[in-house]
Amino acid sequence: MFAFLIKRLLWLPILLNAVGIITFALGLYGPGDPVEVMLGPRSNPEAVARVRRELGLDRPFFEQYVLYVDRALHGDFGESLKYRGQPVGELITKRLWVSLQLNLASLALGMALGIPLGILAAVRHNSWMDFLIVAVLVAIISLPSFTITPILSYIFAVQLKVLPAGGWEGLLSKKAILPVIILSVGPAAVFMRQTRASMLEVLGQDYVRTARAKGLSSRVVLMEHAFRNALIPLSTIFGLILAGSVTGSFVVENLLAIPGIGALGVDSLFSRDYPVIIALTLIIASSYVLANTLIDLTYQYLDPRIRIH
Amino acid sequence: MPNRRILIILGVILVALAVMCAGIGAAVLFFSASAGVFTSQVPAVVQPQTAPPNTQPNQPQAPNVTPAKPQPTRPAQGGAPAPSGGVSGILTIPGGEPPTLDPALAQDSTSAAYIVELYSGLVTLDQNLDIVPDLATKWEISDDGKTYTFHLRDAKFSNGKVVNADAFKYAIERACDAATASVVADSYLGDIVGARSKLRGQTKDVSGVKVVDDKTLQITIDAPKAYFLAKLTYPTAFALDRQSVESGGKTWASNPKSAIGSGAFKLAKYDLGQSIVLQRNDQYYGTPKPTLNEVHYMLSGGSTMTRYQTGELDATPVGLNDIDAVLDTNNPLNKELHAVEPTMSLFYVGFDVKKPPFDDINVRQAFNYAIDKQKILDVVLHKTQLPAKGILPPGMPGYNPNLDPYPFDVSKAKQLLAKSKYAGKMPDITISVSGAGGTAAGSVEAIVEMYKQNLGVDVQIEQLEWATYLNDLKGHRFQMFGVTAGWIADYPDPQDFLDILFHSGSRDNNFNYANSQVDQLLEQARVERDQNKRYDLYHKAEQMILQDAPIVPLGHDVEYWLVKPYVQNMPFPPMIIPKLKFVTVAK
Amino acid sequence: MGLRRSRTLEFLGHFSQNPLAVIGLGLVLMMVLAGIFAPVLAPYSFRAQDLNAVNQAPTWAHPLGTDQLGRDQFSRIIWGARTALIVAPATVAISLLLGVIFGALAGYFGGWVDALVMRLADIMFAFPGILLALFLAATLTPRVDNWLKSVGLGDFVKTGYASFLVVTMVLGLVGWPGLARLVRGQVLVIKEEPYIEAARAVGLTPGRLLWHYLVPNALPPVIVTLSFGLGGAIVAEATLSFFGIGIQPPAASWGRMIIDNYTLWRTYPLLVWIPGIIVGAIQASFSFIGDGLNDALNPRIGR
């Protein structure tokens, strides 16, 4: 177990380096240039060359990279190229916090709705309740966020005027209701489906049948055997959602004017603001690795048949 | 058995169809029931820098619009500062997140709009875009047109320090210091003798800038360029307090302690991503004295129309969604509508005149005649642009109102095309456009369809993401381009359009256009010191360029704003000028 | 033969017992038919504009109204089905192929193979897909266009339809790690099942073992995910359009229809709602089918 943990944590810097190098390479050799975007349609190769030199963008690839890593290790993630002079850390932290609150709240709401509904649907398999739960949740999650956001805003903000149409005043304000609901639909449906599917599978397995046949009450059967096993694929999904949630909400954030990380991320892509892009990439990468490590640990805890290396 | 199953499946498909129709029907009902109800939210889709405007144009014909003629500047009550008693003196408006507040770095309109309120320079633009004295009360130009001697007024920075000639020398040399990494210093200050060598790091100071005495500044430029003064209205040459800048570190300009300027307002608070608060600068020397105590810019964007209607905001730009409703005279909001004069912009279809088939003038002219601009602007762009007949926008000095070389004329277009050497064997044509940010490609598609219908020519659309588009544009890799990305003047001089876009030696001549006669006219106009003669030269050049047709001019941007009745004298100039000092709020 | 036939029947029986799955199948069939017979079914061309009749509410002439260029929404929806029909399965096929191969290898062999594949997946996953997509699209598009023109498919390029090749490749290449992880997780569990150990003891080669036992048994949850993936590919294509690198106009795609009309979402909501709801309906259908398949395929589910 400890060996595994240490192994995984040793992977982290290697992974972060790999991701960082790819991002740097795309920045250097990819289409578009941050200084050119600063200038807009006006071209001035001399000024571009000068500013690139001044910002260190013309140095050899590995020199730039090593410099960046060195600074990053000292907590300095550089300065934004679009918001000139602004330290990237400062630019990101506040927005990250907003996005994190939003996504964790949605994730919690999604789990709270999805898992019980999934169990209910599985226990009442093939009843009208099962169909209703599946039909409604899947229908809603299937609407792309490009669609569900304007539809819900149109109904609740424009027509009924019961919810504000956008903005952000913290998680505990009325303005957070619409985005949290919209963002929780996805996790809710995924959790519901996955819980239901795994539960059905587990319910059909011999040992559960045996347990039932032995006369154990159905609740004990559910909790002891079924629910526990049903969580195995769930944790995979959870990790994927967690990793995706940092970037996943950019449409919602954009439309509802929430100063989160999604809007900054998209903006930094358009303006080729590589210091910001790299920092965001590294944040996503580390949260992903940490989430996965946790998942693998849970795997082993939940199902001792799995050996982890 | 199998038959029954098939029947079930068929039945279910029918039911599904019915459900779909019912759902759509319900949506239709819901929609039509709600038509006429008007609330609003500006879509906050991220847009690249020169995304097409999403606001409404000034339609001179539209009877229900009262164009906001620039009001003659009314000095505030005897120059008295804050009015008191029942007047809040606070203006709350939406604003964009500025990439920078540093005058030396600003290259975009969002940043410049804040900076012109916080800092000031030797000269500025009034509401008619005439160049007027600001920190300099008067100036002399030497006989050879190369040396400008500015006489400064008695003025103070917001921290009480005197604005002297050194403040300008410092600002200019700082902007030209390679370490400042300004992308615009070359364009705005590059005419000054020694500026370029300073930019290249060859010299320590800019030899063309001389402090004669505390109140006298002498600037020498490399040639008698008539448009040089216009460039000094841009933030790059604004006065700075050396001590404040140097004490503030890299982020000095966004920190109220070190962001010290001589503008009508001073920075009171900058909450990244949330708000910017400006406060009246009591040291301000100019007229009128500002009457507002504070200006609050809300940066979070989003539903500005809704927030305007709930009274959270005192003014808001009108988004594409709301134009039709606001233009309706029955809408009470119509009375609060203000039209902005067309901005200093041109949207166009550009051709690379070296690439077939656009190396044939007949093809280019045919492409000019074959587009019904008015229709596209009215229908697809919701009148967000004023049709362009020539190249220069109406507010530009030297604008020629008598131009209209290419009215919509299909038969003429067909004749010209038949006359061209590509008649009947048209090569492949691709139009490249910047298509990022969910901005409507509608106008591009409408244009392409008109070419297909009216000329029988197929044009392929290639949408590129903004940074890629810029890269390819500057690399001259396009055959036909533009439409959603155009040209915006930084200073009100025809040179910034005609010379920069169409001189054969200009870097921004993306058309590969070269006409030695046009070049000659443009070169003459650069140094002509009689304004009228100069504009004549530009008229001639513009006509010749249009005749050669390296572009199809499409339109000039127009914006609409809603402003609460208690906000008075808000100017809507076609360029960025200091304007908050004119505004009063009587609430 | 007889046995197989009866199993097919049994499968169909289970499947058709699931009304949602049947509805979903019906909708998907409609999409497939609409896509195949688009030129016949659509009353108008996908690019025919009428600037005198823009943003119209539904009428008999235009059952779903017209868009901001006066194009018939109904016809564009039908042509969009053809786009979806090509992009979604092709994208998912690429992801599936890569995902199953990598996932199965990692799960089965464990050790350094597992570590290598999963670390690669980690990198792919941790990396913002859209950044890679931007890069791929910018580098691939001109090459693909030129290649198509050189083999005489210029018309395909001119109408914007060639861009799906690029879109498909981009989405497929970006989308495999999720599947790989899922397959690996499943294989890890199944590997320890008694029948696999028995098969191994009998001396089946790893390849046969993987192909005949592990992969099919790991498939049900993969199918569930895939059903989402098919719809997801349609949404992802819309996201690419948002960045200006999706299906090129004037080709009709549902994602494009949403993005292009987005600025009018409040005043002409139908322009966004109709393609949005259709995308939703199709994605839901794929999910329902996935559930139905899962129930019908999986012998271990209690009935």
Image (spheres, helix red, strand yellow):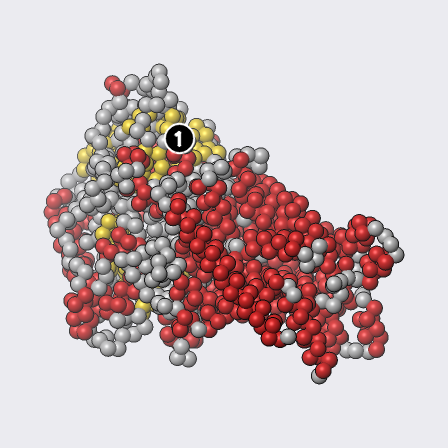
Among all residues in the image, which is located at the extreme right? A214
Out of B142 and B350, give the one closest to the viewer.
B350
Out of A304 and B63, give the one closest to the viewer.
B63
Q: Is residue B415 above or below residue B533?
A: below
**In which quadrant will I find the C terminus of chain B?**
top left
Q: Quadrant of residue B243?
A: top left
Q: Amino acid at mark 1?
A: Gly
Q: Is residue B215 above or below residue A25?
A: above
For residue B257, side relative to residue B413 (left or right): right
Q: Position of residue C256 (x, y in %)?
A: 43, 59
Chain of the residue under label 1: B
Q: Secondary structure at mark 1?
A: loop
Residue at 45% x, 30% y is B269
Q: Position of residue B256 (x, y in %)?
A: 45, 29
Q: Position of residue C241 (x, y in %)?
A: 45, 59
Q: Position of residue B122 (x, y in %)?
A: 27, 33
Residue at 36% x, 54% y is C57
Q: Which residue is mark 1?
A: B311
Out of A108 and B244, give the one closest to the viewer.
A108
